[in-house]
Structure formats: C-alpha cells, structure tokens
Image (cartoon, rainbow, N blue to C red):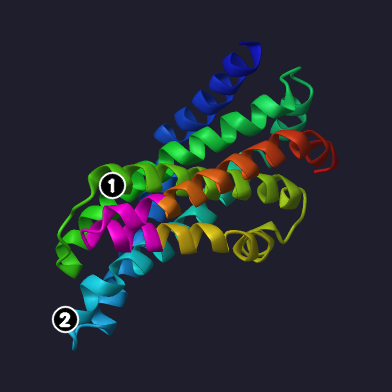
Amino acid sequence: MRLLREAVLVAGKDLRIEARSRVVFAQVLPFGGIVLVLFAFALDPDRGLLPRVAPGLFWIAVLLASLLAVSRAFAIEADNGARDGLRLSGIDPAAIFLGKTAAVVVELLALEVVLGAGVVILYDVRVTGGPALLLASLAATTGLAATGSVYGVLAAGLRARETLVPLLVLPFVAPVMLGGTRAFEAALGGVTSEAWPWVELLGVFALMATTIGVLVFGPLLEES
C-alpha cells in the first residue's frame, strides 16, 4: 500500500506541474495534430486509402507525442536540483517509476482522445469494436509510457537527452506499434475476434515493460 500511495504522490506532482504549465497540451497536442493533418494532405489524392492507413498513422502520431511527453516528464526535474531532492526524499524508486509512468499514461490517453477524434474527422473512419479499441489503447499506452520512463531516466543526466530518448526508445516499441496498428485495423474493420490476440500481445508487453522498469529504475536514477 505504501508503494501505491507514493506512486500516486509522484503522479499527482507531475500532473499538477503539467496542469499549471500546460506545456504538454500546448506543444505535444498540436504536434500530434499537425502530423495527422500532414498525412491527410499527403494521401488526399486517394481518399479510399485514408481509412485503411488510419490505424498506423494514429499510432505514429501517438508514438511521436509520447517521446515529447517522456522527455518533458524528466526535463521538469533537471533544474534547481529537483532530481537530487527526489532521490533523497525516501520515496521508493519503484514508486517514482510507477508514478511517472502513470502520469505519462494519463497525459497520452487524453491526447489520444483528441487525436482519435481528428482521425475520425480527417480520415473518414467509422468507429467499431469499442472495447477492443479501449483495451488496446490502454495496454499500448502503458507499454509506451513504461518503456519511455526507463530510457528517460537513463538519458536524464546527459546533455543530449532530447535526441537520445528517441534513439533509445524507438527500437524497443516495435511490438507496441505492430500490436496497436493490427488491433485497431481488426476492430475498425468489424473483425473484433482478430483484434483480441493483438490486445493480449500489448498487455504482455506492457506488463514486461512495467516489471523491468520497477526492477531497474532505482539503479538508473542513482546514476542519472
């Protein structure tokens, strides 16, 4: 229970900072929207293609937005010795990891709602298979946030962290991109039964990424 309470405290801290600064929604959300609009313009000559590629484009936009959100989650503690204060606070490093991951998940889910509405409007997509879409989004977002948090703290103490985080994260989130895209394709195509195996894959990846993060975050935080 103590681990959970500390994780909630860390998540609340990060979310309050973002609520006051509004950096994520002022920068990350427009960035994701621009990505969707650019793809819509690029594929506009063939309107029949847009609904078919919408799942992949949606997850590309989410992935790029998640990189910015993760970088922001660790950049807020780069000044004024805030990271040292976090290390010396007595909070379990596993709770710090879970709290930061949870905060990123909340931010990304909120972004996904807006980006999903943009996909429906711009790409003429009919929404079907709601439960599969929701569970796939939750599992994929958790996997992205957990993986990003691990590599975010790894690069936090480095000057080139803004460029290192994408280089570190992108190779390891291929299962999320594949699973998220395939699950959305099946659900939006009306074949929900084919979406569930991909949802299970996303759930396994999210569990593995979270477990690894809980185990390694403490040593990585001490070295950052």
Most common SS among magenta residues: helix
Q: Secondary structure at mark 1?
A: helix
Q: Which residue is mark 1?
A: 113
- Label 1: how many Cα within 10 Å (few below 14, some 14–19, many 20+): few
Residue 51 drawn at (x, y percent): 22, 71
Residue 140 drawn at (x, y percent): 47, 49
Residue 143 shows which numbered tag?
none
**Residue drawn where x is 58% and y is 25% of the image:** 10
Q: Quadrant of residue 109?
A: top left
In the displayed structure, 213 sits above or below 69; it is above
Q: Which residues are magenta?
A: 182-196
Name the residue type under label 1: Val
Residue 76 drawn at (x, y percent): 60, 40
**Residue drawn where x is 71% and y is 45% of the image:** 153
User: Quick one: label 1 or label 2, which is nearer the N terminus?
Assistant: 2
Judge left or right: residue 84 versus residue 66.
right
- Quadrant housing the N terminus: top right
**Residue drawn where x is 85% and y is 42% of the image:** 223
Name the residue type under label 2: Arg
In the image, residue 4 lies in the stretch drawn in magenta: no
Residue 82 drawn at (x, y percent): 69, 32
**Residue drawn where x is 37% and y is 50% of the image:** 26
Q: Which residue is mark 2?
A: 47
- Label 2: how many Cα within 10 Å (few below 14, some 14–19, many 20+): few
For discs 1 and 2, the disc positioned in front in the rendered view? 2
Q: Gap in Å between the C-alphas at discs 1 and 2?
A: 23 Å
